């Protein structure tokens, strides 16, 4: 699966500015497609999302971005076979240093200080992310009233481009898009009101707005 910037921001819970900064500083670079100048877009894989989730968890537990980059530099030097360390290793931290483990026997202190208190299990993070992704991508139905009539509308999330698409079940040709669910719904409501006023159904593909 390929994930665009907007979808990544929503799934990981970071700001767009933070995501861009992590990409440019090498914390987590998109493996599918990197930005190549103004107007270009980054594209992330599921493995990238796991790495981003791990980076955010480390940040939430008190590890600074500088320390995360230092830990990644250590891993790059000692484990050059790892393409995305944050998505391939088990991490442990006490809020002051970062430990990593490839197996139970070998635990490496990437910052050379402190002792670990708890672990950030990779499997748990993957499981959480899969659950969030399933919920994020699942279609959602709502009822909406337009000019005295009730319609069923279905929202879907755009993983690649971000934003939302909403379609009317009773009038399949009525489709709208928006950066948020409310924006998409407001546009669809206008489309339905217009066509109800004209007394005709929109043709397939009409009513789409960005």
Image (tube, rainbow, N blue to C red):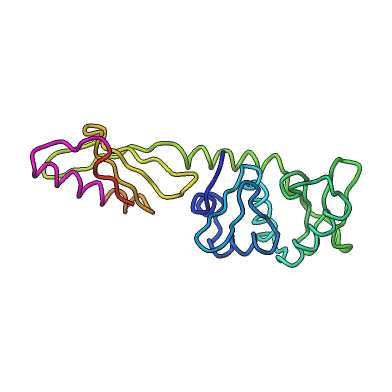
Q: Nearer the viewer, residue 106 or 194?
A: 194
Segment colored magenta: 186-204
Where, quadrant-wise, is the N terminus in this rendering?
top right
Q: Residue at x 25, y 46 (%)?
A: 188
Q: Residue at the front extreme?
A: 37
Residue 69 part of the magenta segment: no
Residue 200 part of the magenta segment: yes
Q: Residue at x 59, y 63 (%)?
A: 18
Number of numbered labels in the structure image: 0
Quadrant for residue 55, please give it.
bottom right
**Residue 24 point in image, percent of width and height:** 65, 63
**Residue 130 point in image, percent of width and height:** 58, 38
Q: Residue at x 47, y 42 (%)?
A: 136
Q: Nearer the viewer, residue 209 or 86?
A: 209
Q: Residue at x 36, y 41 (%)?
A: 155
Left or right: 34 as drawn, with respect to 137: right
Q: Nearer the viewer, residue 157 or 33?
A: 33
- In the displayed structure, 208 sits above or below 113; it is above
Q: Residue at the right extreme?
A: 105
Left or right: 209 as drawn, with respect to 191: right
Quadrant for residue 170, please give it.
top left
- In the displayed structure, 169 sits above or below 191; it is above
**Residue 13 point in image, percent of width and height:** 54, 55
**Residue 165 point in image, percent of width and height:** 36, 44
- Which SS does the magenta portion mostly show? helix
Quadrant for residue 175, please give it.
top left
């Amino acid at each position: 699966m390929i994930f665009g910037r907007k979808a990544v921001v929503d799934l990981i819970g970071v700001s767009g500015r933070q995501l861009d900064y992590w990409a440019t500083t090498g914390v987590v670079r998109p493996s599918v497609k990197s930005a190549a100048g103004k107007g270009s877009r980054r594209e992330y894989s599921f493995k990238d999302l796991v790495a981003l989730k791990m980076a955010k968890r480390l940040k939430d537990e008190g590890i600074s971005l500088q320390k995360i980059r230092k830990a990644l530099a250590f891993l790059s030097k000692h484990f050059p076979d790892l393409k995305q360390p944050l998505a391939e290793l088990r991490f442990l931290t006490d809020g002051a240093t970062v430990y990593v483990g490839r197996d139970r026997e070998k635990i490496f202190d990437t910052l050379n200080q402190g002792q670990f208190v708890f672990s950030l299990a990779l499997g748990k993070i993957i499981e959480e992310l899969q659950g969030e992704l399933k919920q994020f991508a699942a279609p959602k139905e709502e009822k909406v009233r337009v000019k005295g009539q009730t319609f069923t509308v279905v929202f879907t999330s755009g993983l690649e481009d971000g934003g939302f698409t909403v379609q009317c079940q009773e009038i399949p040709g009525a489709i709208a898009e928006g950066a948020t669910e409310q924006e998409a719904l407001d546009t669809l409501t206008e489309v339905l009101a217009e066509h109800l006023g004209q007394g005709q159904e929109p043709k397939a593909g009409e009513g789409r707005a960005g």
